[in-house]
Image (cartoon, grey):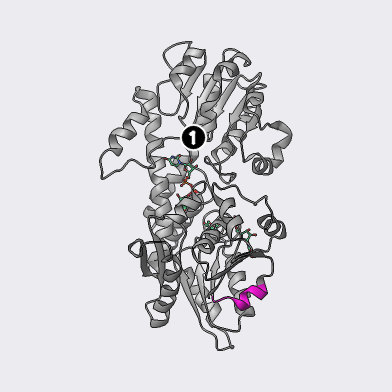
Amino acid sequence: MTNILCIGAGYVGGPTMAVIAKHCPQHRIDVVDINEEKIAAWQSDQLPIYEPGLKEIVLEVRDKNLFFSTEVDRHIAEADIIFVSVNTPTKTFGQGAGKAADLQYWEKTARQILENSTSPKIVVEKSTLPVRTAEAMERILNSNDKGLFFDVVSNPEFLAEGTAISDMENPDRVLIGGRETPSGQKAIQAVVDVYAQWVPRERIITTNLWSSELSKLVANAFLAQRISSINAISNLCEKTEADVAEVAHAIGSDSRIGPNFLKASVGFGGSCFKKDILNLVYLCEFYGLPEVAAYWEQVIKMNEFQELNFASKMVSAMFNTVAGKRIALFGAAFKAHTSDTRESPALAVSRALLEERAQIVLTDPHALENARMDLEDVADQVIFEPDPYAAAKDAHAIAVLTEWPQFAELDYQAIHEKMVKPAFIFDGRNILDHKKLYEIGFNVYAIGKPPRSHFSNRAT
Ligand code: UDX
Ligand code: UDX
């Protein structure tokens, strides 16, 4: 039996460890966190995060070989392999503020591991970190007078929220990086052995430490770049009567380009893309490569433009004013099938419309509580309404900001009847039937498509 510990019971640590526990009944998995409330939630029937399929697995393995606890020190002492999955947000102060990763929790955790260890351990970086962080971690861990040696291994996560369980169950690849020394290779093998319980060996890629650390940032940068590229083109489509969905299909059919991650949208969100690209930008600047930094920074700038431009297109379509107008925003989560609102375009659009003095009604099947916390400073100006029909009642406009499939299933005829006329709908995710909505009487504005308005053939 191997004692596996995960420090950090968040969106990554929780689902990852639940799947490892399911496939490795011979090992004991403990997940610890400093947040007592979160641990209590993991121990209850109300898990702290919504993720399809997660609850079933947790109920299957919890208290068998998966345990949640706040006793960080004790579990460190007992562990053989420690996954560290504490948060590494963008630094808000000092050198690199706004771009570099804030490693204070990671460093604190490394020191805590050292303090409580009486045997050598493998420490696995699960959190996204700047390339060469492992070097610093090795220095902290191995500068001890206990005669202990720690191997640091990088095993970045590639799971996407909303599909975390299936991504873990059936990953495209698992990446494990380590030192090229005999001890480093042994540590890589120990982590490979865990995943090999259910992942075909050919999908487990092993590399040196730095390739692994950097690959995580680069993977997210490439994914976000595809969205920013198609979003950039969506604006050109709106000016030229090209249809971005048709363009995406046409280019994505080229196998060199591929069909995925080409959905034009109101913008990308989530805890990773912006943070990781800013981290990459900072690294490029740090290593004296300003042109490379500027190249990747543009992916973020394009996304910020996409979010704000969406709000300003709403204002201009609605006769250049939304002051006092009720606007129903369908979706607060940064994508469908998650309760997570971190960096959600819905927040940026809400704030932009509030600046125009609109009256915002936000609806979402799972993310309203998180949105309430994110918008705490303006909460008195926002109505949080779980029922989309109630949210749209007496509204001048609806804007779809998250691609929840249930938003496409609503009875828009009934919704239209209860709205102020002329009624507007802005589909920031292109999930609705635009022709049908137009026939019902809506003025329909989608991303990268010619508008369908009852006033004229051109966007106002
Ligand atoms: C993680 C990684 O931290 C991030 O770098 C990566 O890019 C995505 O995955 P996530 O799991 O989404 O992020 O973060 P979060 O849900 O905030 O979970 C981190 C947990 O670590 C929190 O529950 C926090 O309480 C805990 N934590 C933080 C500790 O237990 N100890 C600490 O010292 C700091
Ligand atoms: C991402 C990476 O996909 C994952 O591998 C990594 O481990 C963490 O970061 P995540 O942020 O959970 O995962 O979600 P993702 O599915 O990548 O979506 C990110 C954002 O892009 C969402 O706001 C989504 O709505 C948007 N998106 C995605 C688009 O706008 N268009 C697309 O074609 C795809």
* Residue 284 or residue 105, whichever sits in front: 105
Location of residue 428 in the rendering, given as x and y in whole percent from the top left corner: 49, 31
The residue indicated by pointer 1 is 266
User: Could you tell me the amino acid type at mark 1?
Assistant: Val
Q: Residue furthest right?
A: 380
Location of residue 174 in the rendering, given as x and y in whole percent from the top left corner: 41, 61
Kind of element beneath mark 1: loop
* Residue 160 or residue 106, whichever sits in front: 160
Q: Residue furthest top?
A: 455
Location of residue 389 in the rendering, given as x and y in whole percent from the top left corner: 63, 24
Q: Main secondary structure of the magenta part?
A: helix
Callout 1 crowding tier (Cα within 10 Å): few <14, some 14–19, many ≥20: many
Ligand 1 image-quadrant field: bottom right
* For residue 198, side relative to residue 83 (left or right): left
On whether residue 15 falls in the magenta region, the answer is no
* Residue 229 or residue 410, whichever sits in front: 410
Could you say which quadrant of the image residue 459 lies in? top left
Range shown magenta: 73-80
Could you say which quadrant of the image residue 175 lies in? bottom left
Q: Is the residue at mark 1 in contact range of ligand 2, meaning its CB lies under 8 Å from it?
A: yes
Q: Is residue 419 visible?
A: yes
Going 68% across and 31% down the picture, which residue do you hit? Answer: 385
Going 36% across and 42% down the picture, which residue do you hit? Answer: 260
Going 40% across and 56% down the picture, which residue do you hit? Answer: 218
Location of residue 448 in the rendering, given as x and y in whole percent from the top left corner: 40, 28
* Residue 272 or residue 458, whichever sits in front: 272
Q: Is residue 247 above or below residue 454?
A: below
Going 35% across and 22% down the picture, which residue do you hit? Answer: 241
* For residue 118, side relative to residue 136 (left or right): right
Q: Is residue 345 above or below residue 168?
A: above
